[in-house]
Amino acid sequence: MLNTKNKERNMEALRVYREGLKTVPRLRHLFLELTLRCNERCLHCGSNCGDVTSEELTASQYAKFLAEVKGDMGTDGKMLCITGGEPLLRKDFFEIMGSAHDLGFRWGMTSNGTLITPEVAKDLKRVGMGTISISIDGLEGTHDAFRRTPGGWQKGMQGIENLLKEGGFKAVQITTVVTHKNIGELEELYKIFNDMDIDSWRVINIEPMGRAKQHPDYLLTDDEYRYMFEFIRNKRIAGEPVTYGCSHYLGMEYEREVRDWYFICTAGTYIASIMANGDITACLDIERRPEFIQGNILRDRFKDVWENKFQIFRRDLSDSNEKCKACPDVKYCHGDGYHCWDFDKNEPQLCFKDILF
């Protein structure tokens, strides 16, 4: 375990840095939600993706937008994060990402892996994909039930193998959403993934958002949260590339123990997103409410929106909650992440105080 005084010193420096980001934001990750269509029906999906019909930008609209971003803001220090739905359902996927690659953007993506054949893996390398995270949410039966996709585990695992066989990517990662139904499978999953040549395993908890709200039996108990974080920390102590995601302030005991960085929510300061219909917002995991739409790339210049709007995200959530403001950890937590805040009740939907610390 790292020295607590060093952690406090680092968290204080991060707090000061975050204050600066509120007035001088630095775009680092630009998410492109290529589609809300998906060939799986995951019980936890925050965007309610699946067999849906929604507006989608065309390949030429993406090319024009990305050329505009490059001209206005450059590509250095920026990464495109491609997501959905399942991005590979777009028939023009390689046209879109080929344009991005030609413009000089670095990019990575999230996928369920089921559509990654050897030919698709080869094409992903051709158009410059650097990183990818594939979702595997338990052993075969558990995964397929959670994602309501018979055969999804086998296809996803084969997709990973196809990527590894192709090679040449900066990082191939597996992401596992931990639930009440699969937490007992973590050790067995570790053994399976350890025999594969993946670069890292990202272990995250199911969040009380999206479809997960309709399935409370999948949410973790307090003891299960503690077990999950101890599992991650023990693997990392042993030198294994296991990490927790970016979400949530975890208290001084677990901060920097289960991931390579300290908690900071960068929605609207490092992160912006373009929804499938062109709407501009911060993190795509945040509840989709009209007040969070900052513009649309079909009518607004992204640079102007980034520099002159987004103020709703450049504040502390804790300012609107008396209990949070009175908490001694608020200077590091700031009300936690935007994606897990209840904006009707003005309170966090998940707080690890009294669970971890």
Image: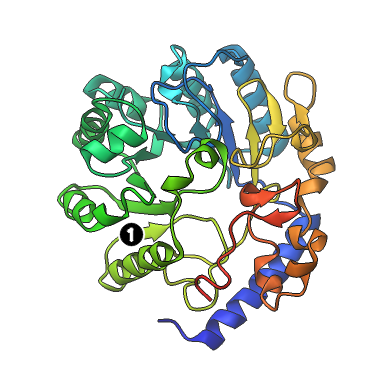
Picture residue at 58% right of the left edge, 71% below the top: 353
Image quarter where the N terminus lies is bottom left
Local crowd at mark 1 within 10 Å, few (<14), some, or many (≥20)?
Answer: many
335 w.r.t. 357: above or below:
above
Query: Which x, y percent locates residue 230?
Result: 35, 70
86 w.r.t. 204: above or below:
above
Left or right: 224 with respect to 54?
left
Picture residue at 81% right of the left edge, 35% below the top: 304
Picture residue at 40% right of the left edge, 31% below the top: 128
Camera-side residue: 203 or 199? 203
Camera-side residue: 157 or 224? 224
What residue occupies the far left of the structure in this picture?
A: 195
Query: Which x, y percent locates residue 165?
Result: 18, 35
**Mark 1 lies on residue:** 242
Q: Secondary structure at mark 1?
A: strand
Is residue 180 visible from the viewing direction of this image? yes
Picture residue at 51% right of the left edge, 26% below the top: 49
229 w.r.t. 181: above or below:
below
What residue occupies the far front of the structure in this picture?
A: 217
Q: How many marks?
A: 1
Query: Which x, y percent locates residue 101?
Result: 48, 28
256 w.r.t. 283: above or below:
below
Rendered image quadrant of residue 236: bottom left
Kind of residue at badge 1: Val
